[in-house]
Image (cartoon, rainbow, N blue to C red):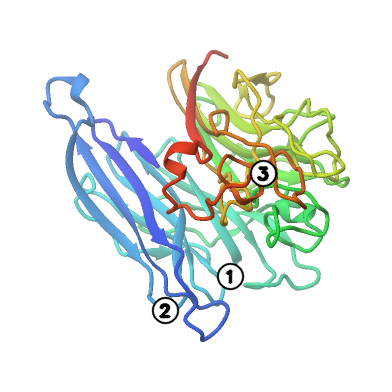
């Protein structure tokens, strides 16, 4: 995550980790290592704005894993307030046991130091993916996905929702986190037949026979339109309809998050699944982007994106965009951002047996300039399946076992030349 303050400083937040190995004590206990950090880049010349963010200054560690407890830190967000100069960071802390938490830290000295992590998610479980937005008087608003059903298995009758909290003192203290809006999340596990988050070739195949990556981070993503009267907060999130279709829903608040509108679909579509929304705001316009399989010739609400009834995959996924000029109350007709559809189901991970697409999509806006960035598979080299018994799912990449290759690890050198792992980041400038 990256954010600019009002003085030419760029703040870059990230996390690094390995996935660890089981230490034999329990299935939930892994010897993980990793950390959360924020780096600062300043102007190389204070009087030359063309050098803003070009000089590395420092990196500050915010959190580390507890080795051997299966803990990890992930799902970060970072916002610098251009008025106060404060830098706000939030992330998900996964313990390996018990309810994971949303933690928050702030810097009041341009990233030189950060406060001790503050827990925002008391009384809530399943906490994932915090999103921060700054209000007109410097309010720090944070939303994330949560539930009230336990750490590992949701209890009967439990609900999933967008959790919300706010600070009116620059991130020193926060209101008690609460349920802002209840919804049924659109999760990839609904397509597996056994609850698996992703499915591919054996031994990572699933009863349904489909091939797909995990897409089970269901938002919400938060934006603030402080030009409205009154100022407005907007949340977008991926929700499942009663037939299983995934659609981006939104709500808005005109009283600082004290209450929220009823959920509506942001860009209603009769076909295709929508997931991984991202919202941003600038100069009276709230912008939203997301992945969308609208136009999939094999679409069914009961099948994952870009799969036909036999589990054969295709390139059907695009990035789409819509905007609102009234604080998220109404939205423009969506437009397509990508210039070609991609297949998100290519089996590039797990020993070349399963797809991994990640929730790697973002948007940013300054004035009328809107930029979108997303994960793109167009450059990955695929290959026909030649091994007897292959599933012919059109998701195999050059060098993997079902194509007759010997590449079963990210460390195998043959991937340096096959192009099978050529999953890239693409961007576009959007004109609403």
Residue 420: x %, y % from top left: 53, 39
Q: Residue at x 57, y 39 (%)?
A: 398
| Upstream in sequence: badge 1 or badge 3 | 1
**Left or right of 190: which side holds 102?**
left
Gap in Å between the C-alphas at discs 1 and 3?
21 Å
For mark 3, give the secondary structure: loop
Please state which of residues 4 and 328 is positioned toward the viewer in this rendering: 4
Gap in Å between the C-alphas at discs 1 and 2?
26 Å
Which disc, if any, is residue 123? 1
**In the image, farthest residue toward the bottom:** 25
| Upstream in sequence: badge 1 or badge 2 | 2
**Left or right of 45: which side holds 292?**
right
**Mark 1 or 3: the one toward you:** 1
**Mark 3 or 2: the one toward you:** 2
Q: Residue at x 73, y 56 (%)?
A: 189
Residue 402: x %, y % from top left: 66, 48
For mark 1, give the secondary structure: loop
| Upstream in sequence: badge 3 or badge 2 | 2
Residue 114 visible (yes or no): no
Residue 295: x %, y % from top left: 78, 25
Please state which of residues 13 and 323 is positioned toward the viewer in this rendering: 13
For mark 2, give the secondary structure: loop
Q: Residue at x 50, y 77 (%)?
A: 22
Gap in Å between the C-alphas at discs 3 and 2?
41 Å
Residue 130: x %, y % from top left: 51, 51
Q: Residue at x 27, y 40 (%)?
A: 85
**In the image, farthest residue toward the top:** 431
Please state which of residues 228 and 52 is positioned toward the viewer in this rendering: 52
Give yes or no for contact between labels 3 and 2 (Cβ–Cβ under 8 Å).
Answer: no
Which disc, if any, is residue 68? 2
Q: Which residue is mark 3?
A: 260
Disc 1 packing (10 Å; few <14; some 14–19; many ≥20): few
């Amino acid at each position: 995550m990256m954010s600019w303050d009002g003085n030419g400083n760029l703040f870059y937040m990230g996390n690094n980790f390995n996935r660890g190995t089981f230490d034999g004590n329990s299935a939930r206990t892994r010897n993980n290592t990793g950390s959360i950090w924020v780096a600062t880049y300043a102007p190389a010349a204070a009087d030359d704005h063309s050098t803003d963010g070009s000089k590395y200054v420092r990196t500050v560690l915010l959190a580390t894993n507890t080795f051997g407890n299966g803990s990890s830190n992930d799902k970060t967000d970072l916002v610098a307030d251009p008025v106060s100069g404060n830098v706000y960071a939030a992330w998900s802390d996964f313990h390996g046991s018990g309810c994971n938490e949303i933690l928050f830290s702030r810097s009041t000295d341009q990233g030189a130091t950060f406060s001790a992590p503050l827990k925002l998610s008391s009384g809530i479980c399943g906490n994932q993916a915090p999103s921060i937005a700054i209000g007109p008087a410097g309010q720090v608003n944070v939303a994330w996905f949560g539930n009230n059903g336990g750490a590992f298995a949701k209890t009967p009758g439990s609900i999933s929702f967008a959790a919300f909290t706010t600070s009116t003192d620059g991130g020193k203290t926060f209101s008690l986190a609460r349920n802002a809006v209840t919804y049924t999340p659109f999760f990839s596990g609904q397509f597996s037949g056994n609850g698996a988050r992703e499915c591919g070739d054996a031994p990572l195949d699933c009863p349904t026979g489909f091939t797909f990556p995990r897409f089970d981070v269901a938002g919400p993503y938060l934006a603030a339109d402080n030009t409205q009267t009154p100022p407005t907060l907007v949340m977008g999130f991926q929700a499942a309809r009663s037939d299983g279709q995934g659609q981006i829903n939104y709500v808005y608040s005109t009283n600082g998050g004290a209450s929220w509108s009823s959920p509506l679909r942001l860009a209603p579509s009769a076909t295709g699944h929508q997931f991984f929304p991202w919202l941003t705001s600038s100069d009276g316009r709230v912008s939203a982007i997301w992945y969308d399989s609208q136009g999939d010739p094999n679409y069914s609400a009961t099948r994952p994106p870009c799969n036909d009834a036999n589990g054969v995959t295709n390139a059907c996924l695009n990035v789409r965009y819509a905007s609102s000029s009234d604080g998220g109350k109404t939205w423009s007709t969506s437009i397509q951002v990508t210039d070609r559809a991609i297949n998100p189901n290519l089996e590039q991970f797990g020993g070349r047996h399963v797809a991994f697409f990640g929730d790697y999509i973002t948007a940013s806006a300054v004035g009328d300039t809107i930029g979108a960035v997303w994960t793109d598979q167009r450059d990955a080299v695929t290959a026909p399946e030649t091994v007897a018994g292959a599933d012919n799912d059109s998701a195999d990449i050059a060098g993997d076992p079902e194509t007759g290759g010997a590449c079963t690890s990210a460390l195998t050198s043959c991937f340096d030349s096959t192009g099978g792992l050529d999953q890239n980041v693409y961007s576009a400038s959007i004109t609403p």
